[in-house]
Image (cartoon, rainbow, N blue to C red):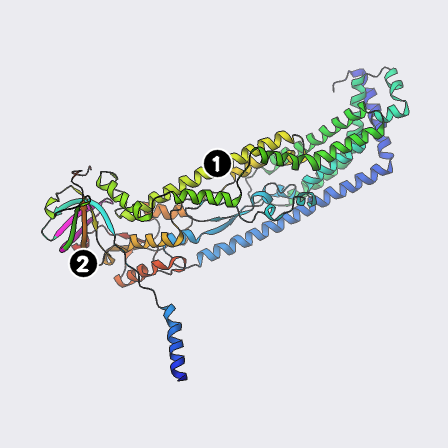
Amino acid sequence: MKQLLFAVLALSLLVPALPMAHPGHDHKLMGTVSSIDKNKISMKTTEGKDATFEVTPTTNFKNGSKKGLQSDLKVGMRVVVNVGDGVEPIKAKEVQYSTATTTAKK
Amino acid sequence: VIVAPASRAASLTIAVKDATEIWRDGRFRWAAVLLLILLVAAVAGGAHNQSEIARQHAAAQQAERDVWLDKGDMNPHAAAHYGSFVFKPVQPLSAIDPGLDPFVGVFVFLEAHRQQLARHRPIEDATPTRRLGQLTPAAAALVLLPLLVIALTFASFAGERDQGTLRPLLAMGISRRALLAGKAMGAMLPLAAVIVPAAIAGAVILYLNAPADPDAPIAARAGGMAAVYLAHALIWIGLGLTVSARARSQGSALVVLLALWFANAFIMPPLAMAAAKWIEPSPSALEFAAAIQDGKDSWPSWDERVERVMQRFLAGEFESTIAPSNVEVMALLESEADETALYDRRFDELFERYRRQARTFERADAGGPLAVDGAGRHRRGARSRFRGGRRALSRGDADDAECRAGHVRPPQRLRLHERPRALGEGAAVRLRRAAGGVGGEPRVVEPGRVERVAAGCGHGRGVVGVVDEARLDAAPPDAS
């Protein structure tokens, strides 16, 4: 009984020492579409870096506040891509764009 | 007072006669010797105190530096908020007059994003009479020396009148100006017997105290201070002679001068300060903090701010290619800018009130020892405000946002910079973030190692990571 008690105590002491898992946030990247494939979208971020994201059947497209379509996307269009927690392979959870503004100025 | 050459001899005769009589008076000798001892002791004590404070500051600064260097690797945002204390250098002239130190404090906490005032100001814990208990050379020169001047001047004319010698003096053909000049010199000569040795002793003691900043014009400043004290003493000599000339008797002259001295030293300063505070009320610390909090409460929530950034980007804003690609980082930067503007506005308002208070105080107490001693004190105090930089979120939120910003980057593509040992102010961290990192060689590390860093981000100040800066590599994530 005592051994069980000490084991529980030891375990309870260990719990706070364990690193808490990072809660994970959805991260959104801003950029300009540079190429569009069926399953991939590449964009140049506002930092000037290139990034590519997988488009899956669950990827949600939004045109402003309305539902959008991947076919609406055009090269040069400004997009905000929700890349989830950013773990590779990076999949786009949501791609937001606005047809009200066409292409980004360079 | 300009006197004709013919009257100079008479003036000198009067001056020598008065000075000799004063010097022969044992009461004056006692008072002069006591004041001299007091002045020299005050300078010596002040110098010792100044040296001790300088030594303590140096030790504390070194200890603080060691703490900073030994704190280990840290997320840059956490490091910027980890902060460090810095201490104001102690200059030799603080042995004469500690000046602003008791009012604005001697050390500040440097932390990114926050604007800080000096901490633990001695005046905060002091009673209103604390100043009276401070034996500084400045206090002795501005409060006690006038007493000696009063003792030297109250009988200058009134005594002659009481003894019936004033009319015969004037009947001898001595002009009023020559008489005034002789009386003034007669008071100044014995006074010089106190001031000159004290000034020499003070100069020697100050010379032996090495300045914290060798380039500081200590001699010029000391000369300026001496000129102010001398002018103050001369004003009191003029006042004493005026009252003595107009008083009916020595007794009444003495009473009037003592009343003036008391009012000037003890009544007018607090009255002037109370008037200044009444005319230009300043907020309490709690009110000031509440005003800043009210400003923050009026801002959009974090989620709203992120959403707005996103919508503005889609609407065509953020043309620059150096804008962060992460929406949250952009929101964080804007939040910091808002907070900086808020702090700037509130602090500017606060210090403008202080400036107006100081002006009111100096007008109301013109010539008073505290006004002379602290001329421009409040204005200079206002400028002593430290701006620690900008701050966007509470520490936990900021760390979290920073962590999120880093976490989105694919671990395989993270390029890491070792933390430079000299990493200091928040500005340095901001520069690193904006310019892609300064100092240290960028290198690519194992993904697992990066993940450990990322996982540790949420632990805020206590996080121990292996890097302090993580940036997206130029290569696209899927190119490998």
Neighbourhood count class around disc 1 (C-alpha, 10 Å): few under 14, some 14–19, many 20 upward = few
Which contiguous range is marked in magenta? A40-57
Residue B71 part of the magenta-drawn span: no
Alpha carbons under labels 1 and 2: distance apart? 52 Å
Q: Chain of mark 1?
A: B
Quadrant of residue B250 within the rendered picture: top right
Q: Is residue B248 above or below residue B34?
A: above
Residue B267 image offset from top left, x and y in percent? 69, 36
Residue kind at label 2, given as amino acid type: Pro
Q: Chain of mark 2?
A: A
Label 2: state its secondary structure: loop
Residue B76 image offset from top left, x and y in percent? 37, 53
Label 1: state its secondary structure: helix
Q: How many marks?
A: 2
Q: Are marks 1 and 2 on the same chain?
A: no
Residue A44 part of the magenta-drawn span: yes
Labelled disc at residue A103: none
Residue B311 image offset from top left, x and y in percent? 24, 42
Residue kind at label 1, given as amino acid type: Glu
Which residue is situated farthest in the bottom direction here?
A1
Q: Is residue B437 above or below residue A104?
A: below
* Residue under pointer 2: A89
* Residue under pointer 1: B349
Q: Who is closer to the viewer here, B413 or B323?
A: B323
Neighbourhood count class around disc 2 (C-alpha, 10 Å): few under 14, some 14–19, many 20 upward = few
Q: Is residue B120 rendered to the left or right of residue B46?
A: left
Quadrant of residue A102 within the rendered picture: top left
Q: Is residue A97 above or below residue B168?
A: below
